[in-house]
Amino acid sequence: MLERMKEKASNLDPDLREPVARFFYWINERTQIAIKKEQGDKWPWTDDPILQEYKFTNAFREDDKTTVWFRNWIRDPLQDSPDVYMAIVIFRWFNLIETGITLKENDLLVNWDAQKAYDLIIPQEKWVTGAYMIKSPTGLNKVKGICQTIDAVWKDRKRFLKQSQAPTSLQRMCLMLEGYPFLGPFLAYEIVTDLRHTSIGKRAKDIRTWANAGPGAMRGLNRIFGRELEYTSKKHGWNEEMQWLLGIASHFYEGPQRTFEMREIEHSLCEFDKYERVRTGLGRPRSKYYPK
């Protein structure tokens, strides 16, 4: 696979050939793992020792287990309703299927009640995702804190929906969400990524031109374009570089027919950075993969 990617990259600038080939190698190899796993093939689904040992998300966020459940049971059924906005906000703040089931079965995703949600969620063995950091007010337990922060967004939902109307922009919605207490850039981007698949955001003008480049994606781009790994200038053209990768993605991608958008590039850059940290001996991901 890697040699094929290098051959495809042979017409690029010599300094870009190796890192670009490795980036798209990661996307293709991780995609093949997902396909083999779905088919019921026996582990290991790859000869790559790093991908065998450590946990990496799918190249396409829409294929991740939590997103698949959320899409099928909540996001798609509500996609044409204004209620989908708060359903996304509430679910992603917990981002746990078990909590999502509790909220859905008690109609709390469209009729939010902080105290009722707290009383129902607190007895659960686990409350929130371990995939990313969930911020909440100090001095409160995690569930109480999240319920309190969701209240602020719930009370302001009509204003958000009105201001997010045409011309719709994913970047603009992301900046609006970041204005709420404890709803930082990462969570805002997760919410906006889901909104893109609903009537609220599906016509956004910047789906193929903008993504919220987080620290991991920036390091991934730094690896590809030969910069110091910790370079993070806000004035840098991160989106222009991701647009360039998006433009050549179809040439390198060898999996089932899929539509690449900026989210797939940004998302994969972050995972590619994790992969390269192991390969180059500079670190390793938090989680190892244990096949069931």
Image (cartoon, rainbow, N blue to C red):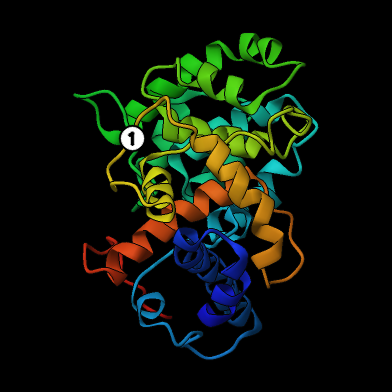
Residue that mark 1 sits on: 232
Q: Residue furthest left?
A: 139
User: Which residue occupies 54% across, 16% down?
Assistant: 176
Q: In which quarter of the image is residue 289?
A: bottom left
Q: Quadrant of residue 203?
A: top right
Badge 1: few (under 14), some or many (20 or more) residues near its Cα, within 10 Å? Answer: some
Against 276, residue 86 (above or below) is above
Against 247, residue 214 (above or below) is above
User: Which residue occupies 54% across, 11% down?
Assistant: 155
Q: Nearer the viewer, residue 167 or 136?
A: 167
Can residue 106 be seen here? no
- Amino acid carrying mark 1 in the image: Thr
User: Which residue occupies 41% across, 75% down?
Assistant: 51
Can residue 38 be seen here? yes
Q: Nearer the viewer, residue 130 or 101?
A: 130
Of the 4 image quadrants, the one containing the N terminus is: bottom right
Against 97, residue 53 (above or below) is below
